[in-house]
């Protein structure tokens, strides 16, 4: 994967914000000596959210004041809803509990209905870690990657299959895009990301996607072998809330560019707004470290300071690049803004999305 920018960079604005609040409420005022801190992961062991939590565990233990014992506690179930509900009801705001967020955390919050008893808009985001989204297709579908417009138009007359966990899980991004591109795609639910990838490589699934890290490690070699064609990225949110090309693969068009190529106009209206929220859920807020509502500035700044020190830690950088790549990380207010852009959806946009899900998958939310 092409080097994007210096490891785990953050914008100057975020750095100055972090410095300002640390001066206002020094992290030294907090001492976790002899304490135990629980990192709640609302997923089972081995998944992306779990790996993210275990990535941070030793470095929070090293850099939080007082070097507390940090434990990862898995509370899976209900697409992360069970663990998130537990965190909302039980998390102490003294820094002894933190939550690991992932795309499913955000999609469950938006679409989980009455099962959702948590309000993550009130949680305090310390860091959000973006992960790019890479779309690829079986080469035997006729996809060539040479002319994306011709490729998609050729696919429109075929019955295609794509897979995901549930209609409202992280895979929502691909199904909405396939629909916007006019493809006839039948969903196969109940498959994790790894199983979805393997099904594609076996030829059972035609279209799929991966996070950048997973794609580079597990799928890119099949592009070189000619088994699959890597044809598009989701893009990332750049300055001014503009969708820009994924810096890991800058030669590939974003989903928004492909739409314009197909129809000769920009994606707009509710579909554009909905897809932007999904982009923030699935890419910009792919992973996050969150503290509960009511956490004091002193505790929050202690975590923020520990995260900054970890990002500069050479050992962390070496380990983290395998999990989250070198995308710029969002800290403090910028992280909170990412979360808000992901889940704070206007009722009219949410209604449009829920109607689309009902029509597409016959699932009422």
Image (cartoon, rainbow, N blue to C red):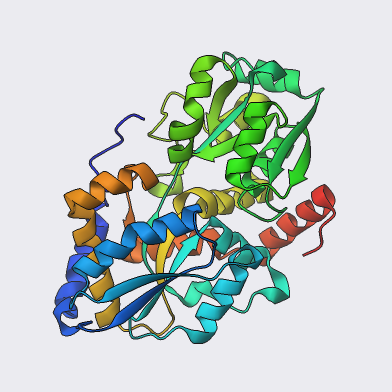
* Residue 196 sits in quarter: top right
Residue 331 visible, this angle: no
Q: Residue 169: horizontal and vertical position, in percent?
A: 64, 54
In the foreground, 39 or 307 = 39
Q: Residue 64: horizontal and vertical position, in percent?
A: 22, 72
Residue drawn at x 47%, y 58% is 49
* Residue 309 sits in quarter: bottom left
Residue drawn at x 71%, y 71% is 113
Q: Residue 364: horizontal and vertical position, in percent?
A: 81, 62
Residue drawn at x 31%, y 84% is 296
* Residue 75 sits in quarter: bottom right
In the foreground, 148 or 207 = 207
Q: Quadrant of the C terminus?
A: bottom right
In the foreground, 221 or 345 = 221
**Would you say 121 lies left or right of 196 here?**
left
In the foreground, 256 or 217 = 217
Residue 166 visible, this angle: yes
**Would you say 153 lies left or right of 289 here?**
right
Q: Quadrant of the N terminus?
A: top left
User: Relative to 316, does residue 206 appear above or below in the rendering?
Assistant: above
Q: Residue 353: horizontal and vertical position, in percent?
A: 71, 55
User: Relative to 211, does residue 354 appear above or below in the rendering?
Assistant: below
Q: How many marks?
A: 0
User: Relative to 243, does residue 206 appear above or below in the rendering?
Assistant: above
């Amino acid at each position: 994967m092409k080097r994007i920018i210096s490891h785990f960079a953050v914008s100057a604005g975020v750095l100055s914000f972090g410095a300002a609040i640390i001066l206002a409420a020094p992290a030294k005022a907090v001492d976790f000596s002899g304490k135990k801190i629980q990192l709640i992961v609302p997923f089972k062991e081995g998944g992306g959210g779990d790996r993210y939590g275990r990535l941070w565990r030793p470095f929070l233990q090293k850099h939080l004041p007082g070097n507390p014992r940090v434990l990862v506690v898995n509370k899976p179930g209900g697409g992360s809803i069970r663990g998130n509900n537990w965190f909302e009801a039980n998390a102490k705001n003294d820094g002894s509990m933190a939550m690991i967020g992932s795309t499913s955390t955000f999609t469950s919050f938006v679409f989980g209905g009455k099962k959702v008893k948590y309000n993550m808009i009130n949680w305090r985001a310390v860091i959000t870690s973006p992960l790019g989204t890479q779309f690829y297709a079986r080469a035997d579908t006729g996809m060539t990657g040479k002319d994306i417009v011709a490729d998609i138009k050729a696919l429109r007359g075929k019955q295609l299959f794509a897979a995901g966990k549930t209609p409202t899980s992280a895979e929502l991004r691909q199904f909405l895009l396939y629909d916007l591109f006019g493809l006839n795609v039948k969903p196969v639910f109940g498959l994790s990301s790894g199983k979805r990838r393997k099904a594609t490589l076996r030829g059972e699934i035609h279209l799929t996607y991966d996070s950048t890290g997973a794609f580079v490690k597990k799928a890119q070699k099949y592009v070189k072998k000619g088994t699959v064609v890597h044809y598009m990225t989701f893009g990332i949110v750049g300055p001014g809330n503009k969708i820009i090309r994924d810096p890991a693969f800058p030669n590939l068009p974003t989903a928004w560019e492909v739409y314009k190529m197909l129809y000769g106009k920009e994606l707009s209206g509710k579909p554009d707004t909905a897809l932007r929220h999904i982009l923030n859920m699935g890419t910009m807020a792919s992973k996050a470290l969150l503290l509960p509502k009511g956490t004091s500035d002193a505790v929050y700044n202690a975590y923020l300071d520990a995260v900054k020190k970890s990002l500069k830690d050479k050992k962390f950088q070496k380990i983290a690049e395998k999990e989250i790549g070198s995308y710029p990380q969002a800290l403090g207010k910028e992280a909170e803004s990412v979360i808000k852009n992901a889940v704070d959806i206007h009722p009219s946009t949410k209604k449009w999305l829920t109607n689309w899900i009902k029509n597409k998958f016959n699932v009422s939310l």
